[in-house]
Image (cartoon, rainbow, N blue to C red):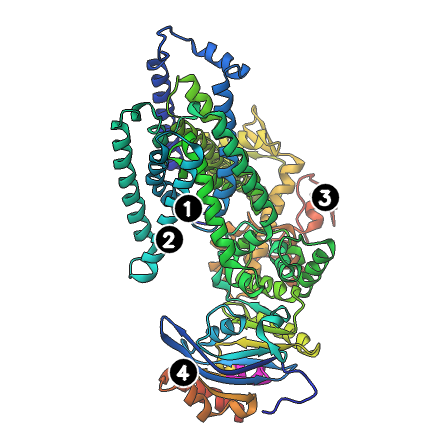
Amino acid sequence: MDPTSTKTVPLEIHDLTVAYHNKPVLYGIDAVIPEGKLVGIIGPNGAGKSTLIKAIMGLVPIEAGWVKLFGSDRKSKLKRVAYVPQRESVDWDFPVNVLDVVLMGRYGKLGLIRRPSKEDRAIAWSCLEKVNLTPYADRQISNLSGGQQQRVFLARALAQESDLYLMDEPFAGVDAATEASIIELLHTLRAEGKTIMVVHHDLPTARNYFDMLMLLNMRLVGLGPTSEMFTYEKLQKTYGGRLTILSEVADAVRQTHS
Amino acid sequence: MRCGKPIPDTMLGRSIITILAVALNALMMLQLHAERIGQSVDIHPLDQLRRFVALEDPALRFALAGGLILGLLCGLMGSFLVVRKLSLVGDTISHAVLPGVAAGFLWNMEKDPVAILIGATTAGLLGMVLVTQLTRRTRLKEDTAMGMVLAGFFGIGICMMGMIQRLPTGSKSGIDKFLFGQAASLGWGDIQLMSVVGLLVLILILTFYKELLTTSFDPQFSGSIQIPVHTIEHGFMLLLAFAIVISLEAVGVVLVSAMLIIPAATAYLLCDRMHWMLFWACLIGMIAGAGGAFFSFLGQKLPTGPFMVLSASGLFALALAFAPRQGLVSRWWARHARSSRIRRENALKSIFHVLEKEHFAREGVTLIDLAHSRSQTLHETEKTCRELTRAGLASIAHEEKAVYLTPEGMRRAQTIVRNHRLWERYLTDAANYRPDHVHDDAEEIEHVLGEATVRMLERQLNFVDRDPHGKPIPSIQDISGQPKNRNPDGMTGYHTPS
């Protein structure tokens, strides 16, 4: 797990502890994520997967430990990180259209007060093209399917032109075709040398989608190449005694070895 | 609200009746109060109207300016309140400011706008802090905390105002105007203060529009791109308190939240983008503000607030009824147009079926045959045919008691039959339905299939020409009138596809 010395490490977490209302959610997480990897964050409900991402972004207060981005202090490099929140976290009846939302991806680069320029609009448009949503650019966002809404969020993240992407359940509630197109998009990003961390719920697909897995259940259970992490023992440790999930795990592991 | 349940039509009727009743009451009140304090000469409403339009009265000019500034401010702030789902916050702050208004008055025993502004803003913010603390430190939820603070502060305010009224100078203070608003009592000082605050709010909202928009839509994302979410939020609350306080004298404590919410809610129904919503909310707010000042003036110093809210509600009712897509009338009209189109198409189809049964040997269909095939009375059939005639799809030959399709009518009839039979075929071939299960489904689908879908079906089904029951499916050549082959009988009606 040594980071290669020549490249800057996009994300390094040391002894990270996060608590909500004095109730710890994450304990002493250590992690080093190398550049250009597609990393799946896996764990049961309430394991703190979303909290980990929010803590990295500074959206929830950190109790102890630290987060380094691209080898230096977190705050100074946040502009190189794009965050994709869960789709349910916003009101889709909000009076904005698709292009408006994608354009918001440019706001971080613009800073306070400055208005988006023609160039920003062109970038937003090209990001819409990458997720095949240009025909919907003028639509109010409630007139979209779940998969399309998720792609709007992805396009907004693309518009940030970041080097590290943190995505909270981008596959939740999307159809199979959208899931495939999102995975293709993530592979394109990886080919460009970007690092991507994805909170993921579905065990069987996790095996195929990701280069590395981060197994999380309030503590870090494991972090490493998918082949090393996707074992019965590791997954059992992550999911504890939850029987239904365990059988799912067993199935998934069996499929790997068949 | 936008995509929610459709509002039942009865509600429209009820709301219109309510509004009419309220308007009628207001008119009666105008009659009763058509008397001016200190001079008992009746002033004709028309005369009042002339005076309003001419703007002779300085008090009237102030009232109108106040109403316009108030409408603009409330529209701006209210739009963000509505999209942030904070509508109740406006209500809480506006009621919580009342003790501050009274305290501001007690400061130097006169209606000093600046003292009242400071007192009221402090009280309003204190109320909001209390709500936040109650929510954070106890298990009470936000709506409960707001309800308590709203009522508690308002009660204290009413007590303090009662005390002021009893003071020797109190009865002349005009402090009672803060309850329901009296635009006519606005002075030059008030207008100056309103303009300054109004301009400040306008400039700040335009400057930080991008940040306000993003934090309203997605606070988590905004935090991730380092927009100072909390600062923006607190700044917004401070502006809101200012806006409420300077609107108080014109519209009153009780109803200022209505001026925040109703114009914004109306705009929300009318448009799909935030900047348009702001524009419409301001426009509607200003119309309502000016309208309130006008009605209050017509009625000789009636409280302004209720009239402003009445005007705003009237505009809301109009939007509810006539908004291009969400409006009840527009939706009713769309539904009506659709159902009469389906009725016409079904009649065309029946005529086609009768013609087809006779192998297109005749040019027209007798009304009796048609009525028989549709299991209708002759009278009903004639009515439907008259409808077709009006739409230019058929003509009735009265002496023969028969109906003839026009070329356009024939084209439409073929289109519908084609849709129906292609869909039946699609269900049996592609979805494995049994032939006796497809008719009812096709009866619905035939009216909504677009040309693009039909062409796709045709291609997928390899241009079949028979439906599952063996009846011919009219092709595009049949419909566009390019004959493939002539009917052997030499009739000029529809020819049987090979």
Residues in magenta, as a range: A205-214
Q: Nearer the viewer, residue B426 or B333?
A: B333
CA distance separating discs 3 and 1? 61 Å
Q: Amino acid at mark 1?
A: Ser
Mark 3 vs mark 1: which is more N-terminal?
A: 1
**Visible in this render: residue B7?**
yes
Q: Which residue is mark 3?
A: B481
CA distance separating discs 2 and 4? 45 Å
CA distance separating discs 2 and 1? 17 Å
Residue contact at pointers 2 and 1, CB within 8 angstroms: no
Judge whether residue B261 is colored magenta. no
Q: Which mark is residue B129?
A: 2
Q: Which residue is mark 4?
A: A245
Residue contact at pointers 3 and 1, CB within 8 angstroms: no
Q: Which mark is residue B87?
A: 1
**Visible in this render: residue B357?**
no
Foreground disc of the pair 3, 4: 4
Quadrant occupied by the C terminus of chain B: bottom right
Identify the subunit bearing mark 3: B
CA distance separating discs 3 and 4? 64 Å
Foreground disc of the pair 2, 1: 2
Q: Amino acid at mark 3?
A: Gly
Residue contact at pointers 3 and 4, CB within 8 angstroms: no
